[in-house]
Amino acid sequence: MDSNQTLPQIDLPRDMIHLGIGQPSNHLLPIKELEKAAAHCLSKENSFFLAYGEERGNANFRQTLAKFLTGQYPNRVDPEQLLITNGNSQALDFICTLFTKPGDTVLVEEPSYFLALRI
């Protein structure tokens, strides 16, 4: 089987594109560019490159996102109002941890993101 058709979660038939896992096909990823960017960052004397980073997410990204969102909404969006997560599963986990407790009932639409039901 072609390595582009094998995912950690499932094996796909050659002519099938599975949209349910939220993961791009390997042939869509800019591997050469990612290798070049990683080599560039690893060649620097920056010991924080591989660290977890800021708790609320990268400040420059939050500022840029806040500026963009401010242009989309009638009220100003402050970077301190934003929390960047590492994907929707982490965001859902944060929301459920903050706003629910074991035994609470949570309503979801159907179909729903398959990992959300376990969170």
Image: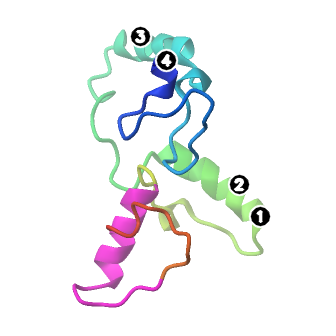
The image shows residue 70, relative to residue 96, as above or below, that is above
Q: Could you give the CA–CA distance between mark 3 and mark 4, rounded to whole angstroms?
A: 27 Å
Residue sitting nearer the eye, 79 or 22:
22
First-in-chain label (1 vs 3): 3
Q: Tag 2, which secondary structure?
A: helix
Q: Could you give the CA–CA distance between mark 4 and mark 1, rounded to whole angstroms?
A: 43 Å
Asked if the residue under mark 4 is in contact with the one under mark 3, i.e. CB atoms within 8 Å, the reply is no
Q: Name the residue under label 2.
A: 68
Q: Could you give the CA–CA distance between mark 2 and mark 4, rounded to whole angstroms?
A: 40 Å
Magenta region: 88-107
Asked if the residue under mark 1 is in contact with the one under mark 2, i.e. CB atoms within 8 Å, the reply is yes
The image shows residue 98, relative to residue 4, as above or below, that is below
Q: In which quarter of the image is the C terminus?
A: bottom left
Q: Tell me the amino acid under the disc marked 4.
A: Asp
Q: Name the residue under label 4.
A: 2
Q: What mark, if any, has residue 39 been given in the picture?
A: 3
